[in-house]
Image: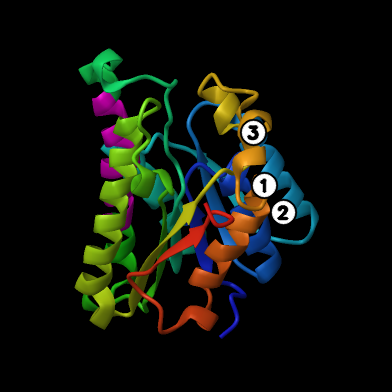
Amino acid sequence: MSATGKALLVTGGGRGIGAAVARQAARAGYRVALTYVSQQGPAQAVVDAIVGAGGEAFAVQGDVGSEADILAVFEAVDRTFGGLDALVNNAGVLEAFSRLDGIGAARMERIMRVNVIGSMLCAREAVKRMSTRHGGRGGAIVNLSSMVAEIGGADQYVDYAASKGAINSFTIGLAREVAAEGIRVNAVSPGMIDTEIHALSGQPDRIARVEGALPMKRAGTADEVASAILYLLSEAASYTTGAILNVSGGR
């Protein structure tokens, strides 16, 4: 089945993996909605590129750390596209490296609120629209996990690693919960990917420092992760649900 005309929401779609997903999805025929928190410019640039190539897209402000914002985002998708066929839970936060004994409760709560609760609330709203139990026509959800969920993030960000471990559990549980309702739920687990997130977390030179120790001797690209996400959204993965796809270059 073609993706032509299907409606996709990508949270955090203005940069990095989210922007790559939005661009690839538009080329595949999806109508794309993407969210941003405060930087409208990069998100609008993604939209302009999609529209300029003949696609359909719009950007909407929304912080997935806020339930009110999430509800407003989904209402905007309803108004613009009249429904939803797919969700990519990409938005997330990563803080500066720190041992646990240097991390305060406010940081822990923010990471869990955005990375875990935000993803769960977005999935909840997607299920309400896509589930055959609610009169929907089915669909697909892809969550963004991380290889750090498996290796733990010691001396760096065990709080972030824990949030991604929660995403793995959530993916498996929700997949089983809605499998008979026409919705597939999967996750991708990227390794070291060359995006702006490293600079935003205070490690702008991280790729250069570690890529020699990676099995493939290079970091991955946002487009490589996006391609895996598009596969999981597609009918090529029609019998795949509850999977966590490793996109880590063997890490």
Neighbour class for label 2 at 10 Å: few (<14), some, many (≥20)? Answer: many
Contact between marks 1 and 2 (CB within 8 A): the answer is: yes
Label 1 vs label 2: CA separation? Answer: 5 Å
In this rendering, would 238 be left or right of 176?
A: right
Q: SS for tag 3?
A: helix
Looking at the rendered structure, which numbered label has been put on residue 207?
3
Q: Which mark is residue 47?
A: 1
Identity, as a three-letter code, of the amino acid under mark 3:
Ile
Q: Position of residue 101 (x, y in %)?
A: 24, 16
Camera-nearest label, 3 or 2 = 3
Residue at position x 43%, y 36% in the image: 62
Q: Amino acid at mark 1?
A: Val
- Would you say 229 lies left or right of 221 here? left
Which residue does the image show at 54% across and 19% down from the upper left?
202
User: Could you say where residue 144 lies in the image, as x and y percent from the top left?
Assistant: 43, 51
* Quarter of the rendering occupied by the N terminus: bottom right
Circle 2 sits in a helix, a strand or a loop, which is it?
Answer: helix
Identify the residue at horizontal 26%, vertical 48% (top origin).
166
Q: Residue at x 52, y 51 (%)?
A: 251
Q: Nearer the viewer, residue 47 or 219?
A: 219
Whole-angstrom CA distance, mark 3 to mark 1, is 28 Å
